[in-house]
Amino acid sequence: MSEEIQVMDSNTEVLLEKGKKDGADTIWDRKAAMKTPCGFGEKGICCRICAMGPCRISPTKDKGAQKGLCGATADTIVARNFARMVAAGTAAHSDHARDIAHVLYMASEDGNYKVKDAGKLMNLAKEWDIKTENRDLYDIAHEVAETALNEFGKPFGTLKFLKRAPYQRQQVWSEQKIEPRAIDREVTSLMHSTHIGCASDPDSIFELSMRTALSDGWGGSMIGTELSDILFGTPTACATQANLGVIEKNMVNILLHGHDPSFSEMMVYASEDPELVKLAKENGADGINLVGMCCTGNEITMRHGVRIAGNFYQQELAIITGAIEAAIVDVQCIFPALADLSDLYHTKFIATSPKAKITGAEYIEFVEEKALETCKGIIKEAVLNFKNRDMENVLIPDNKSHANVGYSVETIIQCLDRVVNSYTDEFNTVKPLADVIWAGVLRGAAGIVGCNNPKVRYDESHITIMKELIKNDVIVVASGCAAQAAAKAGLMTMEAKELCGRGLKEVCERVGIPPVLHMGSCVDISRILDIVSRVAKEKDLDNRDLPVVGAAPEWMSEKAVAIGTYVVASGIDTFLGITPQVTGSEYFVDLLTNRVEENVGAKFYFEENPTECARKILERIEEKREKLGI
Ligand code: NFS
């Protein structure tokens, strides 16, 4: 165990202590065992793209190797490594979206999957010029799904959702030649460009990275969000709880972890099956308690209020409680370590996706055609495992916080409609939001997103930045594990208005919202792009003009690199609390944190100190306000 335990909530401390007694190996231990990370990797100057190497560029100028065997410089190598992270991140979000599109394509009136939000389907059909009059709902759904699937590989044209951006932004993309075409094409093309002997110009590699990343934000992720809402319902405001204290002593606890809502939705329905609940009771439990983790946790809390067990860093701790009958996973952000850890307890660790088979996990393939049946089977396994729990070795910490979640763009607009008469006579728009920003009641808005990372104290950067911003009348929207950090810290309650400045407090009271709004999973950052663009369009401006920022204070995944890049390319400054592995090239760092602004009107900031990061965010917001003359 590391001497310096980097945690900030007591649940985590209590369970790390228990884990130690149980002989569990956690990320904290592995981090300590890792000692100093590889200096070349950390700076992004190790190239293993071909088999002549790996080539390592000396971090000291004029001393040691300055070029790889092919002649690639540190600038090229850093740019290529960064680009490949963007490609992988875009692939992950978009492949998730493709699965959802396939599910919409197979949806039917009498099947497992139905259309839940017909209104949203009709709106999207109209947006995409798909005929709706006198047509069966499912015919329309299938054509929408097929059109979405074509976005991945269409041979001509650019992505349909680009038109949702303010026209000024579309112009920037067109001038910079970074309008993404088909999603798969962008990922493939970027992998090609970064192959040995292809692009070496870092500026060009970054432009290609922006184009690929945009095919995530305005392509894969947006398709994922839209089609999930159509299938499973657009989230509406609801109450939930968050933190490991949501695990129940006398219930069959099922931890759902991963990302794909077509699986988790079905698990929610299956867990409510009266026969299974009866079986749980026959086995001595009070019932079935489904709890969520990471983005799957976000998907099911947004749509059903299913309680959140925790975020990325807590996946092991949940199992260490000794009270999880089954940890069930699909894709992304799953520690392979859960397999060995589960062996220490009675927990069944079940992988379900052919895309993410995990050594040591039981594998029950989730097949969409037999979705409900498969999910019921999995839940039955968990229920039957309750009797194997060692009650003597259960420790469920008490902490859990209340949270209000479910703030889709539609729900935010509905909330704004409540105050429409005080500010404006128009319903169903973001005008009241734009107006309070222009009036200075709110100074601006920040999207705080992303993961946990052992390089910083767990959740602390998220919470410090959020608290500082709301204190200064900046409204926060959050997604991913950052949103779960906020939920655990109580920032998603109505009472959190007491932590706000006067302006934001008044907005929270009048609109009836918490100061930090949960907008969903990481693909749902497309909701944030949507609302920012609506505000920009309301004022006939580009996103770059607005006093809004993005921040990923504790990011770690390739998906986060894709997100940061498309947020910047969308004209929104992005603050990274973890410095990406690019510091081996001053040239590339300067491109990301300075020169890119000339091209797309926004840039990255690297700032690891959360208080300083919040200060810089506020400064930037005020700069934008000054430029607008507001
Ligand atoms: Ni986002 Fe979701 Fe969490 Fe990070 Fe992983 S769960 S897709 S990548 S760790 S925020």
Image (tube, grey):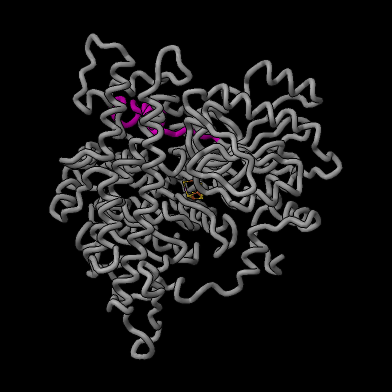
Query: x and y percent of residue 296 in the render?
Result: 52, 38
Q: Residue furthest bottom?
A: 63
| Residue 425 picture quarter | top left
Q: Tell how many labels.
A: 0
Query: x and y percent of residue 284 in the render?
Result: 81, 25
Residue 412 included in the magenta stretch of the image: yes
Query: x and y percent of residue 353 in the render?
Result: 51, 38
Whether residue 402 appears in this view of the structure is no
Q: Which residue is painted at 28% across and 56% down in the image?
A: 190
The one of 83 and 163 positioned closer to us in this rendering: 83
Q: Residue furthest right?
A: 392
Residue 174 included in the magenta stretch of the image: no
Quadrant housing the N terminus: bottom right
Judged left or right of residue 328, residue 600 is: left
Identify whether 265 is placed above or below 595.
above
Judged left or right of residue 129, residue 533 is: right
Identify whether 552 is placed above or below 154.
below
| Residue 244 picture quarter | top right
| Residue 51 picture quarter | bottom left
Q: Which residues are magenta?
A: 404-428
Query: x and y percent of residue 108 in the render?
Result: 40, 16
Q: Residue furthest top?
A: 134
Whether residue 119 appears in this view of the structure is yes
Q: Which residue is painted at 27% across and 78% down in the image?
A: 71
Q: Which residue is painted at 32% across and 79% down in the image?
A: 69
Judged left or right of residue 584, residue 402 is: right
